Structure formats: structure tokens, C-alpha cells
Image (cartoon, rainbow, N blue to C red):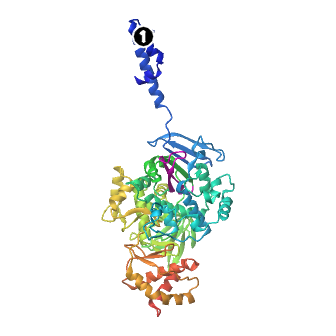
Amino acid sequence: MNGARAFRPQKNRAAGRDARASGSSSALGTPARFAFCLLSSIFCLFCSSHAPAAPALEAVWRDRTGGLAWQRFDGAGRTLERGVLPDSSVVTASAPPGRRVPLGSLWKLFVHLWLTETRAEAPPYVHTGLSSLREEESYCGDPGERIERDAALVRSCGLFFSPVRLKISPDAWRDFWLSRLGSADAAPWLLDLDAMRPQTEVTPAGLIAALEAAPPRAREEAAGILLARAFLRGAAGEPEAWVRHAGGLWRVKTFSWFRPGSDEKARFGGGAGWLADGTAVWFGGDGTGQGVMAKFARSLAAALPAPEASLAPGCVKVRLFARYPLARVERQGGRPAAPGALRGRYVARFENGVSLPFQSDGEIRLTQDGDRPRLDARLGLDDYVARVLDREADAGETEAARALAVVARSFLLNEAGREGNCLVIDDSSRKQRVSPNPASAAARAAAGFTTGLVLAGAPVGYHGVQAAPGRLAWRQAVAEARAGRDWVRILDEAFPQAELSALHDPTGLRCRRFPAAEAWLAGRVPRWQRLLRERLPGFEAPDLPQVCLLPHGKPFSEQDRGRIHLHALKTLNDRVALAHEYLHLGLKHHPSGRDEPLIERWARTLVEGSHE
């Protein structure tokens, strides 16, 4: 009845007391008072249930029509209101695109973009352990650790990105961004190097414009690195909650600061970056950036547009039907196919009498391998994964297919050879079978959703029906998905020793030092360098690299960190592999660094020849 009292004038309460005291009836009798009280309560409850709630989360992104789409959510992740501003230049504080929000640590992302595009020198930051910098340095690793550019972005190490430390010219900074924004009005704060600090107030509309001004190459590199931020371990379950609903589709830099005008107690956090197809996005709400990501992952995944079908680039060379000798390849109708890139519908006829129709849009080439025809495909990384799904499974089983997509991508990276910038693998039951036809929409969706995600730390494989340690059984994955398990839980069950992680994670690639390999290399590098400087054009002697013990998979080198990963140093081939990766480091700035046969010949010369 509190609502009724709120609507009753004070003089009526006094009149009622006077009437009761005199024994007379009031103008509003008892039944009428009861009815009025009841109706007033109902009315007040109705009003309160429809009163606009304060938003706990806001999101802004570029709409497919070119406008700025926005949406507000309550604390439970339910939509309060949404809209689209067709002209991004006309924004007001009444809608999220135009109101003021803190820049937070997003300034580090713009410095990273500038460093990447200009190729400016960015010396590593060395963690000093000084007490005066303790809080800031907590984002930069452990005392004595050197942190490089990409790892600094993942960890949000502001001390690395300090414009003063990097000696960035304010004029060069302004000219760089002004030429890309097109108009100083789009994001005036971005032109001011002094504004690169967390308390700078900006608008989400301006942030979207700034993100869209990022040069394509620098944006793609930063986006790939930002995927690793989803795997930072904060409060329990935070990374898993975000990745479970978003997969590898969102690449955002988180931020945490204070609400504008607050007393520095009300935390305000969120993230900004791009979807996998380059769509710019910003969101912010109550709490820290990681906390907002975890709490509202499901709501944001449902609200933000699904990235347009654009599978990740990359290069995978596949020898199709590697274990089944081909007799001939024909066009439909029986005419022999001409060697070269194939376009259209064809039929592969095998020596065992089996025929298989397939389609190619130029990605498959027909050549002669001795007296037999040979089919080779050159595919993008996610296109390869999607074709594996079509050949090995049923991509219509969405959660199971997402899990298998991660496994297939991980298996490829662990088992494939390398030829220049391409991975090389056979289409075979000993490796992975690959559909020769363009991938289905369902397979493309599963591969695209998990783009950039792999299992690290343990060998992985799969089988149709037989589960085993380190091996996913497709039939079991389907049963678990139909029982309500999502793709992350399916992977956790099948691979308890492996970790779901970003493919390009400059902080997550741990190094267990391999002293014997480092000593072996150190004893030979001085002699090698004299020969290589004289006879191998483009070779630049790198610093003596760290060698890390690789638990499984093919040896490889980290070009940006100058490290080599090797699983053993027991055989001649192990030593050749170590020399091979050393040459990759020395040729990283030269086209010869992509000439895999050349590097292999030189590696064998160094190890086997008189210069060993």
C-alpha cells in the first residue's frame, strides 16, 4: 500500500484523522478508499515496470548499409533500445555513438598501428622492477623480462607504447593519421599525440572512424594479435565465456577506466577493434573490460552482425588423392582436361576404376607426374579446414563441426611441411582427407567461426568412431553436441592436456630452453656466417637465437622474436632442421627467405659439408 500513500495528498490524511475523531464519515468512504488504494498500487507498479532502465552496456558498430548501428542493454544483457544513424557525421549525446566515453588503453592500439605501418624502430621494453612503476609494469611481464611490440599489445603494456620512449614526432603522427582520416573532424583527438592517454574523452563514433582509418596491413596484423587477448587469464572463466560465444570472429583491445564525471569509483570498461571481416566495433559498460567481455559475451554475440563470409587467407598446398593413382582427368563429356588451372566441372578417373566428379574455380591444377596425371590444390587456411569438414564429417552438426574445425587446423599446423609461405600436406587418410569441391556453406561457417583458433601443448588427432588419448571421435562429438555440450566443452573433454589458444599469440608461445641445441649452434655459427656472407645474397647474420624444445610438431622459427623451436637434436635430419630455421632468421628480410628448396640445400651444405 506504499504506492497509495504516495498518491494521497497530505491534507486528505489530516481530514481523515479529523473525521475519525469526530465520529462522522469522510467524503471518501472506507470501500472507496480501499478501491482507490488498490488501483493506485497497480498503477504505480505498472509505471515502475515500464520506466526506462539505465543501460549497463552499449555497443556501436558500422552497419552493412554504411550507417552507425547502436544498441543498449540492461544488466541482464536484455536489449533496452537500438537504432541506426544513417549519417555518421550527425551524432548527438542522446545516442551512444555521440556521447563521451574514455579512451582508456585503446590509445596503445593506435600506437601499435602506427609502428607497424611506418616500420619505426620499437626497441623492447625491459621490466625494471622499480617500485615506482610496479603497477604499470605489472602489465609488462616479470622483472628482467624484455617485452616486444606484439606481446606488449596483448598484455596492454603502456610503458612500451609511450610516445616519448619511442621518440614519435607529433607532426609525423598528425600527418600520418590526417591522411587516412580524410577530415580532422572525424576523430580530432587522434591527430593529437598528447591525447594518447586513458583519460582522453572521445565518442564511439570517433573511435569507429579511427579504427576504419587504420591501414589494411597494420589492421590485419593487429587484429590477428588481438585475438590472443581473449585468452588472457583474469577471473575464472572470463576467456572461455568470451570465446565460447564469439569463437575467433572478434579481435578487440579491451580497456578499463572511469565513467566521465564520476568520482573515480565507477569503473567503465569494454573493448574496440574489428570483426574478422574488418567491421569496426566498440562496446562499453559497467566494470572492467575483461569483466564486461565475460558478462555480456552472449548478448554481444547475438547483437553484433555476423562477419561476412570471408575465410582467412594463408596458403595450403594439397596433393589431392595422394594415395590413389589417377588414370586421367576429363571434362564432363569425356574430353581430356588440359594441363594447368582447372575451371569448371571435371571427372577424376582412377586406375582402380573408380570415378569422382569435382569442380574447380582455378584453385586446382592438373600436371603430369611422370606418366600419370596429378592434381594439386592451393587453398586458403580456413578453406582447407572447411573442405576437411566436408570430407571427414557432417558440418550440419554445428557444435561438433566447430570442435573438429579446431582439431583439423591444429593437425595441419603440426603435421604439414613448409614450402616458402605455404603449408604442404597430402590429401590422405594418413594425414587429412580433403574435398576436391568448393566447401559447403555449413563447413565454411564452422571454419570461419573458429578462424585463428588452435589447440596447443599436446598432439591432436581425430577418428570417425574410436576415441583415444589425444584423439577426438567424431561420433562421440556429435553425441555430446546433441546432449547440449558446446564446442569448447567437447574439446576440453577430448584434449584435457591441450589448451585452446590463438594461432598468433606472441605471449602464449612458451619457451623451454634447449641448451644442447643452443650450444651446438653457437659452435658452428661463426664458420657458417663467413661462408653465408660471401655466397648467399641477402643473408644478414642474426643474433644467436634461443632454441626452444618443441614437444611435438614440425620445427619452426619465430621471425619477430628470433627463436627456433626444435623437438630433438639426435639425428642428421634434426641438425639440418636447426640449420634450416637459422637460415630463415638470416633471410627474413630477403625474398630468398621464401625459397624453401634453396634454404634446404644450404642447410644440408652447412651441416654435411666441409664447413660442418
Of the pair 31 and 309, the residue shown nearer to us: 31
Rendered view: 560 above or below 483: below
Dominant secondary-structure state across the stretch colored magenta: strand
Residue 162 x, y percent position in the rendering = 56, 64
Q: Position of residue 414 (x, y in %)?
A: 42, 70
Question: What amino acid is labelled 1 in the image?
Answer: Asp
Residue 198 within the segment the image draws in magenta: no
Q: Point out the stretch of residues depicted in magenta.
A: 251-278
Q: Is residue 324 left or right of residue 312?
A: left
Q: Which residue is mark 1?
A: 18
Label 1 environment density (alpha carbons within 10 Å; few <14, some 14–19, many ≥20): some
The image shows residue 345 at horizontal and vertical percentages of 54, 63
The part of the image, by quadrant, that contains residue 353 is bottom left
Q: Please tell me in which quadrant of the rendered image residue 360 appears.
A: bottom right
On the rendered structure, is 137 left or right of 430?
Answer: right
**Image: 14 above or below 320:** above
The one nearer the camera, 585 or 151, is 151
Counting from the top left corner in percent of width and height, residue 4 is at 43, 21
How many numbered discs sit on the rendered protein?
1
* Residue 504 visible: yes
Residue 273 colored magenta? yes
Identified at 58% across, 85% down, the residue is 537
